[in-house]
Amino acid sequence: MSVESVGQPLARTQVTAVPVEACRSCGGPRPRPFLSLGRTPIANRLLCPDDLAEPEPVFPLEVGFCASCALVQLTHALPAEEMFDAGYRSFPSSGDTPRRNADRRARELIAGRALGPDSLVVEIASSDGHLLRAFVERGIPVLGIEPSPGLASAARAIGVPTRTEFFDAGLARSLAAQGLRADVIIVDNVLAHVPDPNGFAEGMSVLLADDGIVEVDDPGVGALLDHTGFDTVRHDCFCYFSTIAADALMRRHGLYLTEVEEFSEHPGGILRWRLSRAEGPGPGVGERLDRERAAGLDTFDRYASFADDVRESQAELLTLLHELRAHGRSVAAYGAAAKGAALLNSSGITTDLVQYVVDRNVDKQGKYIPGARTPILDPAVLAQRQPHYLLLLAWNVRDEIMDQQAAFARRGGKFIVPVPRPVVC
């Protein structure tokens, strides 16, 4: 789930970040901080021109570790409505690849679970319905649950029944009371954005049919560590789960890991956790847990080391950009997603170092990166105002961007990949 505010000027409200006094998952002592990225604005709120006249609110951005259950989490809380309100949109389904992936996944689940006209597939945070549509087209009943009114409306327009609500145990009980039980629950890149993991897991347990399964896709904290991906630390990502932490959470609510898949072809990597009511880990789950423990994902020291890597990476990137400016070299950036805003703001990169950002999404063009206030332009500007360097904020799809911008390279432009360490190519 990737969301950015691309609508009307922001309403100014008084919001306070509240310190987290206990682990969001196990309720243990306050998570021990290991990385602070300062006070930054909400990264997924793009600014309209009218917003530039006023300062933006900023909030602490700090990550901590729970020694009791190994969950990595933000140490301050903002209301979920601040990140995911009616003005937010996501852009997951543009292009042919997401549609092909949705079709393949629907076929696999229908065959693997013997789904039919009496089955029910539920997707939590179902966005514009692009995945569930693949089931509808094959005659499988579905229900989407999506808190954004605009996205829910778009899903209903393509024939995907959708509830416009945040998912929690209360909603699950309401649906179960209406006789709805899910044979399959799909949770794609959502778990990190859940402020109350226990209410979420309890809701899945309530809604799941006795012989049903849950599929949770999540980058996992390992991807954060492996790529020094500090740009994924944002106010809308409350938690960063290892399999160890996910297993502890789900067991608490009667859900058990039966399988763990890793998709390395996904940019940055993705884990798929399959869960059911069958007690005990399935084949390969124990091996995955052992690997994570061997890698130190249940120890504070591993995350303290990650924080050192982040500081070194940021310092190297700033040094590079300052050197380029000192030599009269211009730098633009590619990719106006929230991760780009997070990288710019947490590293202190403003328009004196990166003059503008380009993005192919027309809804973002003409707006500004929050905090850094970097203008977002059409990529066509690269040919008109050729910079010497292009900083790839969307580094996770760098090969695709480099292919798209082959003409930029032929004109002498160079690319900067910022993480895990800045590289010019």
Image (cartoon, grey):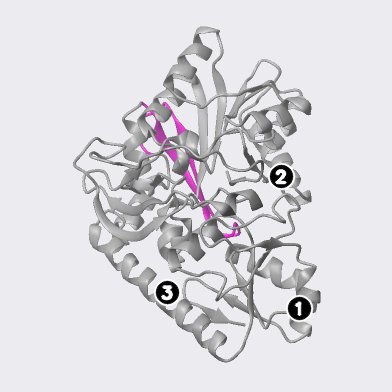
Cα distance in 3D space between marks 3 and 2: 32 Å
The amino acid beneath tag 1 is Phe
Point out the stretch of residues depicted in magenta. 254-281
* Residue at 35% in and 57% down: 291
Q: Secondary structure at mark 2?
A: loop
**Residue at image location 54% in from the left, 89% down from the top:** 326
Residue 405 drawn at (x, y percent): 75, 73
The x, y position of residue 296, in whole percent, is 29, 60
Q: Secondary structure at mark 1?
A: helix
41 and 84: which one is in front? 41
- Residue 258 vs 101, above or below: the answer is above
The amino acid pointed to by label 3 is Ser
CA separation, marks 3 and 1? Answer: 26 Å
The residue tagged 2 is 93
> Which residue is tagged 3?
313
Residue 324 lies in magenta, yes or no?
no
